[in-house]
Amino acid sequence: MLAYSICYAASCGLARMGWYYPSGAVLILAAGYLYYYDYHKSGSLVHLRGLFCAFWTGGQAVACLKLSRLQSDWSLWTWVCFYLALAGFWVTYEIADRLYGEDYGRRRQVKKQSCVQPVFRCMQVLTAVSLAAFIFEAAVLKYIPLFVKGVPHAYSEFHLTGVHYFTVSCVLVPSLAVLFFLEGGSRRSYRNVMAVLMTIISLAIPVMCVSRFQLVFAVLTACFTFGAYCRRMSPWVIPALFVAILPLYVILTIARSHDVAYLNGIFEMKNSGMPIFISQPYIYIANNYENFDCLVEALPRHTLGIRMLFPVWALTGLKFVFPYLISFPLYVTKTELTTVTMFYDAYYDFGILGVTVFSCILGAAAFWLVNALRDTKSGNPVKYLLYGQFAVYMMLSFFTTWFSNPTTWFYLAVTAVMAWYCGMGGRRR
């Protein structure tokens, strides 16, 4: 943590002097060091603290390069918030690990319980429900986003209140398939074939919805679930998966009518000749930090918990009864670029105190999940799915306010139900 603090202070100083490239380079080194620290200590490529440190700090390093005209120098308060977001997480995890942790590589022995059949049934139910919800939405709305041309926001309008949560729950199916085969699969070959077909259907739904995010989320969660279960995973697995889904990502970008001219007009890159495959991921990472700085500069008053309780307002329907609960402006650099960091709503509600406390809570949750893996080698496999989801949230901490998103809590609720069912099924067997 001392090394990171020194690098962070240097990066801040360089940025405030206008030396943007060296500022970003220093943070890139810090991100690599923090990730290697946890990887070397645990032997896991998907260690939660390592992932969070690498991608939160790495994303900030990318933002420090200031390659877009949308970007400006951050306020000192923004720099402090970004530092405390990582420091609170890292220090809380470290304290918990020293007080209650054990050797990550050592697992407690628990009597083996077969969960293959319950996991397969969960796949069946989730795929059927998701597919039925998608068909229902398409029938009511009378279109499928993939086949709509010239409408950039067709996906954002493709949802029915309450139903769409079930449609997008298909993203959990690939992870269940990973667990199904890691647990040994079925001796009946037709069930193995069905598991593959259900996985294909679950990936086809985001494609039909033209949702690049849901597709990437499904693949990453499955990858991290595999890494958590096996502990030892080749470092080439994640790059290979990105290469595999890249063609689909490009196709979905075209299907959303996001051509190069449209995207370059939004991104306002300083180098107009920069290839779109560089400028698009750059702005989708960097501008989130800029949006946080916009919030810090423009927010007139804090909302004292109302923003972070949005899942409650959404899932209970209270947002329709009391619209003022969600009628707060979104402070962003450009109306088309609405993604924000995971700590955006924490600052919106409680300022720097909210960022610090929230990061500490995340650090404690990460420790609990990492510690829980020592019990689950022969226990309930759905816990690996929970770990995989949390790993994605940590990896994409720069992307959105995961824990004030009702879809996140819907996924967690579905995962909890499946964990209970698989636990009961394993004990019966």
Image (cartoon, rainbow, N blue to C red):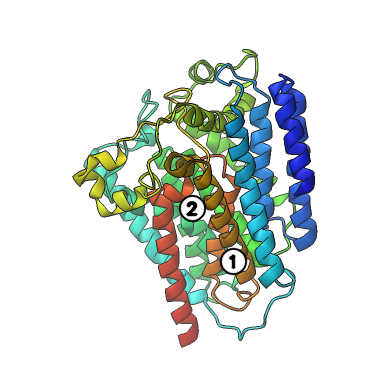
Whole-number angstrom distance, CA of label 1 to CA of label 2: 33 Å
Pick the front one: 22 or 206: 22
Pick the front one: 344 or 398: 344
Q: What's the residue type where badge 1 is placed?
A: Trp
Mark in front: 1 vs 2: 1
Secondary structure under tag 1 reads helix
Is 129 on the left-hand or right-hand side of 57?
left
Chain-order first, disc 1 or disc 2: 2
- Which residue corresponds to mark 1? 368
Specify the label residue 245 is tagged with. Answer: none
- Which residue corresponds to mark 2? 200
Is 52 on the left-hand or right-hand side of 331?
right
Q: Position of residue 216 (x, y in %)?
A: 54, 44
> Label 1 neighbourhood size at 10 Å, few (<14), some (14-19), many (20+)?
some
Q: Position of residue 282 (x, y in %)?
A: 61, 29
Q: Position of residue 25 (x, y in %)?
A: 77, 31
Q: Position of residue 420 (x, y in %)?
A: 43, 74
Residue 220 seen in this snapshot: no
Residue depicted at 40% across the width and 59% down the height:
127
Say if 44 sits above or below 220 in the image: below
> Residue 363 falls in which quadrant of the image?
bottom right
Residue 301 seen in this snapshot: yes
Residue depicted at 65% across the width and 65% down the height:
96
Q: What's the residue type where badge 2 is placed?
A: Ile
Say if 429 sits above or below 275 in the image: below
Secondary structure under tag 2 reads helix
